[in-house]
Amino acid sequence: MVSNHSLEVHFPEKQDVLKSLLNQEGLRLTNQRQEIVALFTTSFADEKHLSAEEIHHQLLRQGQKISFSTIYRTLHVMVDLGILREVELAEGKKYYELNAPFASQHHHLVCVQCGEVHEFEDDRVIKVSQQETHERGFSLLNCQFTVYGVCPQCHNMFNSGG
Amino acid sequence: MVSNHSLEVHFPEKQDVLKSLLNQEGLRLTNQRQEIVALFTTSFADEKHLSAEEIHHQLLRQGQKISFSTIYRTLHVMVDLGILREVELAEGKKYYELNAPFASQHHHLVCVQCGEVHEFEDDRVIKVSQQETHERGFSLLNCQFTVYGVCPQCHNMFNSGG
DNA sequence: TTGTGTGCAAACGGTTTGCATCTCC
DNA sequence: GGAGATGCAAACCGTTTGCACACAA
């Protein structure tokens, strides 16, 4: 059987990019910051929209001890650097995801029953943003488009399960 | 000079609609509920996106004494009845506005500096929502599209004021 | 008259902050 | 060595809730 060692390398170039982005602002690359960002950049992470609590939970499971203050402070730093962006998916808590150009410009379709989140891209959304801001003389910073509905699985549950 | 008495009538038919919507559900029309909904329906209200705190403030200024618990409970009732809907405009607090069909389907352009909110309509946004939900078998409940930018006035302030 | 609505105050949950200690540059 | 980062615990702030009293139907 072939060694899967290559799957386990730590992609040092990613850490270098992160380090120089931080150092440019007089900030430092710490273990905690690395681990938090890694949750968003590892190719095996299928859930890329993370709340502070989910980050805490995942790092604890990996054996990393980290405080909520550090998580919140790191998330702010990453948003300021443009590495992450905040998204509104559910009520009462904030979610974070990789920001463009580190990830594609996309929007979200959320099932209000099970919380499942789909991403999608559509140029029309960007065009409407550009048109509206241009017409009113605004500069465009950001836009959030979130569609709420019920997914097929949850539909079936209600229809068959009573 | 002509009396402006007609401007001051209380549009009793609006209260009747509200009362029957409530009574259908076994709920009651109280003074507090009337006053809260009136903030959204009076034609002179130029700021139609209100938070619980703004509602509290405006009613106090009108000499109405009301508690936050009543405001929050009323907002929930009105959302359940479909009269109001929640919108995400700023961080950390919820805003409410008249819901369709009591108001038009629209979206928001927000200045992140001064908080000014513009409403706009665009069929493309609804079409994208319908297309995405249809493609994935979701039912469409709701969508929120919010564009963030800087308005011309705030631009000028930064450019000229230093 | 009775069940719904209100106000008060306390609880709640996610987030922020002050401070002592630690660590990256 | 010194500025910046961390962890802890307490504070914070918008929101929710339990309970006694008030009021619409």
Image: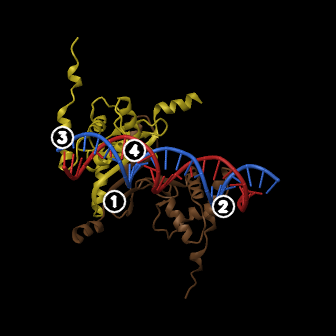
Chain colours: A yellow, B brown, C blue, D red
Nearer the N terminus, badge 1 or badge 2? 2
Do the residues under discs 2 and 3 have CB atoms within 8 angstroms? no
Which of the 4 image quarters holds residue B2?
A: bottom right
**Residue B119 shows in this picture:** yes
Residue in the foreground of this view, choosing between B4 and B36:
B36
The residue drawn where x is 39% and y is 44% is B129
| Residue at mark 2: chain | B
Nearest to the eye among marks 1 and 3: give it.
Answer: 3
Per the image, the residue denoted by label 4 is B129
Q: Residue at x 35, y 64 (%)?
A: B114
Classify mark 3: residues with Cα within 10 Å, few (<14), some (14-19) or many (20+): few
In the rendered structure, which disc, 4 or 1, sits on the residue that comes first in sequence?
1
Q: What residue type is disc 1 on?
A: Val
* Circle 4 chain: B
| Residues tagged by mark 4 and mark 1 found on one chain of the structure | yes
Element at label 2 = loop
Label of residue B112 in the image: 1
Label 1 and label 3: CA atoms lie apart by 29 Å
Point out which mark residue A17 bears: 3
